[in-house]
Image (tube, rainbow, N blue to C red):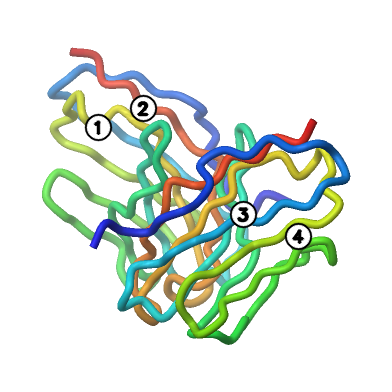
C-alpha cells in the first residue's frame, strides 16, 4: 500500500469555474478527512467521513463545497463557482477509527 | 480565534543539540495533543501524541511535555539531526484524532 493518494497534485482554474479533487485513502481505513491549508497557516478541518457517512462539517465548508464518499472508499471534494479565496492546499487524511491520521500530499488549488 | 498558537515561526539549532518547540492553547476542553512534521511537497506526518491525563510522553529522540495549568506543550528533540529540518505543527482535539485544530507551525532548521 502506497498510502493516501490525492489527485491532481496541482490545479489552476479561473474564478467561477467548478473543480473536483479525488482522494484514495489507505484501503483498510474507515475514516476519511478533508483539511485545507493556506499560506502561513496550519491545516484547518473541513469535514470527515466514517465509511460512507459524512459525520461532521466545519462552518468553513460553505454551500459551494460538497464532499462525497460513495461506497466508503475514495472521496471527492467539489468546489462550485470558485473564488480567489479558495486558493489553498487541500489535504486528505485517513485513519482506522480514531487512530492516528495519515495525510496525502495534497492538491494545490490556484484560482486566478 | 486561534485556539492553538505557535509563536515562533522559525528556529535554528546546531546538529547534536536539543531542539525545543513550543505550543500554547486556549481551550481547556482539549484533551489530546499531537505533533506533526511536514516536509516540502508532502503531507504532515504524525510524530508523537499525549493525552491530558499525562504530562510527558517519550518516543526515541522525541519527548512531548504537557503543562495543563499553563495550557502549554513542548516538543523536545535530542539530539537534533539534519533530517529533523522541517515544519512542525502542534495540534489539539477534544477526542482523540477527530477534528484536529492545528497551530501555524514552526520551521526548524538543523545546522550541520
From the image, tell me which residue sits under label 2: B108
- Mark 4 nearby-residue class (10 Å; few <14, some 14–19, many ≥20): few
Q: Looking at the figure, which quarter contains the C terminus of chain B?
A: top left
**Mark positioned earlier in the residue sequence (1 or 2):** 1
From the image, tell me which residue sits under label 3: A44
In space, the residues marked 4 and 3 are separated at their CA atoms by: 9 Å
From the image, tell me which residue sits under label 1: B84
Looking at the picture, how far across and down is residue B31, in whole percent? 47, 71
In space, the residues marked 4 and 1 are separated at their CA atoms by: 32 Å
- Check whether the beta carbons of the residues at disc 2 and disc 3 lie within 8 A of each other: no
Chain ID at mark 4: A
Q: Would residue B21 be found to the left or right of residue A52 on screen?
A: left
In space, the residues marked 2 and 3 are separated at their CA atoms by: 21 Å
Looking at the picture, how far across and down is residue A3, in whole percent? 31, 58
- Mark 3 nearby-residue class (10 Å; few <14, some 14–19, many ≥20): many
Q: Residue at x 63, y 74 (%)?
A: A68
Amino acid at each position: 500500500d502506497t498510502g493516501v493518494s490525492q489527485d491532481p497534485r496541482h490545479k489552476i482554474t479561473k474564478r467561477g469555474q467548478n473543480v473536483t479533487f479525488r482522494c484514495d485513502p489507505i484501503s483498510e481505513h474507515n475514516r476519511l478527512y478533508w483539511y485545507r491549508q493556506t499560506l502561513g497557516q496550519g491545516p484547518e478541518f473541513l469535514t470527515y467521513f466514517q465509511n460512507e457517512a459524512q459525520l461532521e462539517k466545519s462552518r468553513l465548508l460553505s454551500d459551494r463545497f460538497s464532499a462525497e464518499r460513495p461506497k466508503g472508499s475514495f472521496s471527492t471534494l467539489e468546489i462550485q463557482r470558485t473564488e480567489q479565496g479558495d486558493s489553498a492546499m487541500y489535504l486528505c487524511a485517513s485513519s482506522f477509527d480514531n487512530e492516528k491520521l495519515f495525510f496525502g500530499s495534497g492538491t494545490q488549488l490556484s484560482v486566478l | 480565534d486561534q485556539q492553538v498558537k505557535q509563536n515562533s515561526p522559525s528556529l535554528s539549532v546546531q546538529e547534536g543539540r536539543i531542539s525545543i518547540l513550543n505550543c500554547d492553547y486556549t481551550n481547556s476542553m482539549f484533551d489530546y495533543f499531537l505533533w506533526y512534521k511536514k516536509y516540502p511537497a508532502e503531507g504532515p506526518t504524525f510524530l508523537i501524541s499525549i493525552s491530558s491525563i499525562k504530562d510527558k510522553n517519550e518516543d526515541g529522540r522525541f519527548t512531548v511535555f504537557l503543562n495543563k495549568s499553563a495550557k502549554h506543550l513542548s516538543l523536545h528533540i535530542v539530539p537534533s539531526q539534519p533530517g529533523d529540518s522541517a515544519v512542525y505543527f502542534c495540534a489539539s482535539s477534544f477526542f482523540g484524532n477527530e477534528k484536529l485544530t492545528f497551530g501555524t507551525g514552526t520551521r526548524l532548521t538543523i545546522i550541520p
